[in-house]
Image (tube, rainbow, N blue to C red):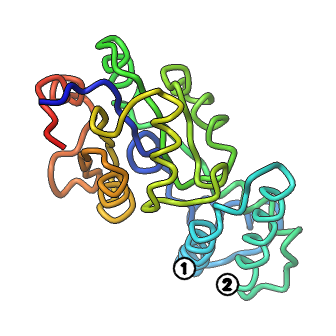
Amino acid sequence: MTPLTAVTLDAMGTLVTVEPPGPRLQRSLARRLGRTVDLARCEGAMRVEMRHYRAHCVSARDAPSLAALRLDCASLLADALALDIAGPDLLPSLTDAIAFGAYPDAAPALAALAAAGLRLAVVANWDISLPEVLARFGLAAPFGAIVTAAEVGAAKPDPKPFQIALERLGVEPANAIHVGDDPDTDIAGARAAGLSALLIDRSGRVPGSLVDLSGLLGRLELTV
C-alpha cells in the first residue's frame, strides 16, 4: 500500500466559485454607461466571454499579457452584446461582472488537511492572478505550491501542471491525490500524471463537499 502524503486541488468549482455574472454585467452597464440591456443578452454574452477566457488563460503569464487577455475578452464581450461600445470602454463593466467567492467548506477543509500533515498544492487552469484571488479569501497560506496553466504554459488535462506541483512539493505521484470538479480536466489529467483522483460535485445533483475530505483521505490507502 502507498501512503498518502500530498493533496492537490483544483481552484474554480472546488475552492472558489463565481457569482452569476449576467446580472452583475446588466447592472454595471446601466450604472456606468447608462445602457439598458436585457438579462438574457447579458448572460449569453458572458458565456461567450468565459469560453474565450478558458481557452486562452494559458497565455496570461505576466501582468502585460494578463492585461491584454482582459482587453481581448472585453472586446469580444462588446461584439457579443452587439453594442456600439469599444472594448476598452466595456472593460470596467466586465471587471464588475466577475466576482469570486470562496466555498464555505474550503478553509476548514484546508486547515484539516494541513493539520493532518499533508502537503498541499493548487493545480488550476487559471491566469497568473490566482495566488492573489486565493489570498483575498484566506486560502493561500496552506499551499506549498500554487500552479497555474498560465505560469507553466500548459492547461489540464495536460499532466505538466500536476508534475510541476509535485516537484515543488517534493512528492511522488503515487503518494498524491488530486481533488477537482471536472472529470475531463481534473480526473483525467491527474491520472495521466500518475496521481489518484477524487471528483467533487458542486452541482447539487449528488453530495459534493470538502467538509469530510480530510477524514476520507485519511482512510484511503492508495494503490496507484
CA–CA distance in space, label 2 to label 1: 8 Å
Depth check, front residue: 33 or 152: 152
| The quadrant where residue 110 appears | top left
Is 1 displayed left or right of 76 in the figure? left
Task: Give 191 or 89, whichever is nearer the viewer.
Answer: 191
User: What x and y, as percent, mark residue 130?
Assistant: 62, 42
Of the residues under marks 2 and 1, which one precedes in the sequence? Answer: 1
- Which x, y percent locates residue 19? 51, 52
| Badge 2 vs badge 1, beta-carbon distance below 8 Å | yes
Residue 7 position, x and y percent, is 35, 32
Q: Position of residue 96 (x, y in %)?
A: 70, 54
The residue positioned 13% from the left and 39% from the top of the image is 223
Name the residue rendered at 23%, 30% in the picture: 213
Q: Could you tell whether 159 is left or right of 84 in the image?
A: left
- Tell me: residue 160, above or below residue 77: above
200 or 171, nearer to the observer: 171
Residue ID for mark 2: 80
User: Tag 1: residue type?
Assistant: Gly
On screen, residue 71 versus residue 104, left or right, reads right
Query: 193 or 83, which is in the foreground?
Result: 193
Alpha-carbon neighbours of circle 2 within 10 Å: few (<14), some, or many (≥20)? some
Hey, what amino acid is under mark 2? Ala
The residue wearing badge 1 is 44
Near mark 1 (Cα within 10 A), the count class, few <14, some 14-19 or many ≥20, is some
User: Is 182 placed above or below 121 here?
Assistant: below
Quarter of the figure with the C terminus? top left
Relative vertical location of residue 164 with respect to residue 105 in this rendering, above or below: below
Label 2: state its secondary structure.
Answer: helix
